[in-house]
Amino acid sequence: MTAYAPARVLLADDQHKVRSALRLLIEQESAFCVVAEAQAAEDMMQQVIRCKPDILLLDWELPGLPADGNKLSALRALAPHVHVIALSGKPEARHEAQREGADGFVSKAEPPETLLKALYSVRDKAYDIDRQPAQFDRAV
């Protein structure tokens, strides 16, 4: 079995309670380390530059994200290595996130175990054994 360094996670959600709950859940797992939080898109981009996360948990309705179907384009241009798991309470957001190239999607209505499963799935594919570019399931 291969030992991994903890995957660096950035939490981006405008609700403090959601970010706190996500942090509490994720920090119970030794496979992940929360490196930063952001409450708006501009702050998120600054944290991506500063903290260099492996995984971004992104509230799909985060204030400041473009509404024109290009939510991930600026992020991908800045940090193509960051793997994005979109979070939303709106079921229709799953298809939009998939079209835009998110590496996973988790409904905010799902139990915490679903988010952990998505995190491990993205982490395991990002750190595949032979270090070849991973193929991602677009909707977890």
Image: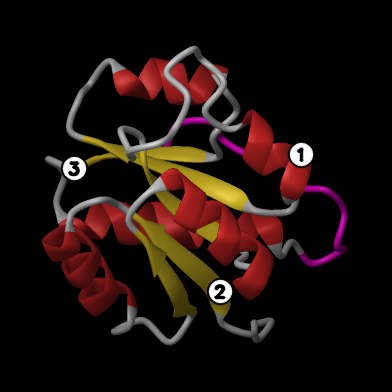
Q: With 9 as the anchor, is 39 left or right in this view?
A: left
Q: Quadrant of residue 140?
A: top left
| Residue occupied by mark 1 | 77
Front position among marks 1 and 2: 1
Residue 139 among magenta residues = yes
Q: Earlier in the sequence, mark 1 or mark 2?
A: 2
| Residue occupied by mark 2 | 8
| Residue positioned 47% across, 65% down in the render | 10
| Residue occupied by mark 3 | 108
Q: CA distance from mark 1 to mark 3?
A: 27 Å
Q: Position of residue 72 (x, y in %)?
A: 58, 32
Question: Mark 2 is on which residue type?
Answer: Arg
> How busy is the neighbourhood of tag 1: few (under 14 within 10 Å), some, or many (20 plus)?
few
Question: Mark 3 is on which residue type?
Answer: Lys
Q: With 106 as the anchor, is 42 left or right in this view?
A: right
Q: Which residues are magenta?
A: 129-140
Pointers 3 and 2 in contact (C-beta within 8 Å): no
Q: Position of residue 33 (x, y in %)?
A: 47, 81
SS under mark 1: helix
SS under mark 2: strand
Q: Earlier in the sequence, mark 1 or mark 3?
A: 1
Residue 101 among magenta residues = no
Q: Quadrant of residue 3?
A: bottom right
> How busy is the neighbourhood of tag 3: few (under 14 within 10 Å), some, or many (20 plus)?
some
| Above/below status of 65 relative to 3 | above
